[in-house]
Amino acid sequence: MPGVSPQPDKFGLAALEPGWIASFRAESFFRAKRTVLPLGQPLRSPGTRVCIVVRYNIHGAASRHDTIGSMGKLTLSDYQALAEFRFQIRRFLHFSEEVVKRAGLERGQYQLMLAIKGMPPGVRPRIRELATRMQVRHHSAVELVNRLEARGFVHRTRAQDDRREVLLALTPKGEKILGELALHHHSQLRSAGPELVSALRRVMRGGADTPARRSSLRKEQVN
C-alpha cells in the first residue's frame, strides 16, 4: 500500500503450517494528534501514520481445533436421521412456498406478516425486531415492508409514547390473506407433524428409531 511502511512479521505468521485453524483480526487505527481536518483536505495529513495490526489468537485456534477433534464420529444411523429430519423440513417448506406463491406473495412477505401478527408479548413490531425474528438483514426487512405496504398489506404507524418510533401493523387486507395462509400451514403441520417430530426425536436419540415408537408418537398426536 503506498505510503505505509511494511510491518515485520512479529508473530511468525509466515511460518504457520497449511491446515492450521487460525483466527486473525485486523485493526486499522491512526496514531496522530486529534485534529479537525478542513473540508476537502485528505484524511491522511502530514504526521498521520496508518498501522495495521494482525493478531494471531493461537490459544483460541487450538481450542476450536481440539473441540472439533473431540466431538467423535457420526454413525450411519446418525446420518440417516439427519437426512430424514432435513427431508421433513424441506417437504414442509416446499408446501409453504407453493401455497404462498398461489396467493400471489413471496415467501418472505408471508413470513414477515406472520412475524408481525405473532410478535411475542411486550415486543414492539419494529423493523429491527422483525429482522431479528426472520434472521435477515435490516435492509432486507425494509424492502419487504416497502413492497407489502405498496400492496396494502401492512402500514407504518408512530408509537404513542415516542413519535420517533415507527411500528408496523397489518391492514384488514393483510389480516385476511394472512389468516387464509396461516390456516393452510396450520392444517399441514397437524397432518405432517408426527413425521417431523419423529425425525427430530430420532436425531436427538442418536439415530435410534423403531416402528413401535413411531406408532406411539402418532397416537399421542391424535389424542
Image: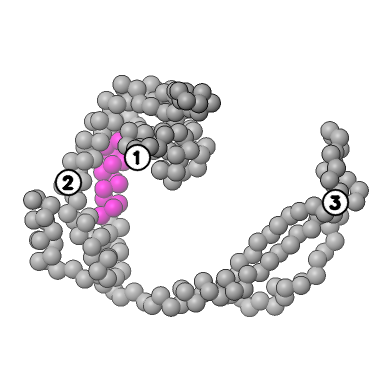
Q: Which of 78 and 175 is in front in this view?
A: 175
Would you say the magenta stretch is mainly helix, strand or loop? helix
Q: In this view, does 159 lie above or below 70?
A: above
Q: Which of 128 and 86 is in front in this view?
A: 128
Cα distance in 3D space between marks 3 and 2: 65 Å
Residue 131 location in percent, x, y? Answer: 45, 40
Residue under numbered circle 3: 32
In magenta segment, residue 89: yes
Residue found at x 29% / y 63% = 83
Cα distance in 3D space between marks 1 and 3: 49 Å
Quadrant of the image occupied by residue 5: bottom right
Residue under numbered circle 2: 190
Q: Are marks 1 and 3 in contact (CB under 8 Å)?
A: no
Q: Residue 120 carries which label?
A: 1
Circle nearer the viewer, 2 or 1: 1
Q: In this view, does 171 lie above or below 108?
A: above
Q: Which amino acid, by three-letter code, is at mark 3?
A: Ala
* Left or right: 194, with 44 as reference point: left
Q: Secondary structure under badge 2?
A: helix
Q: In which quarter of the image is the N terminus?
A: bottom right
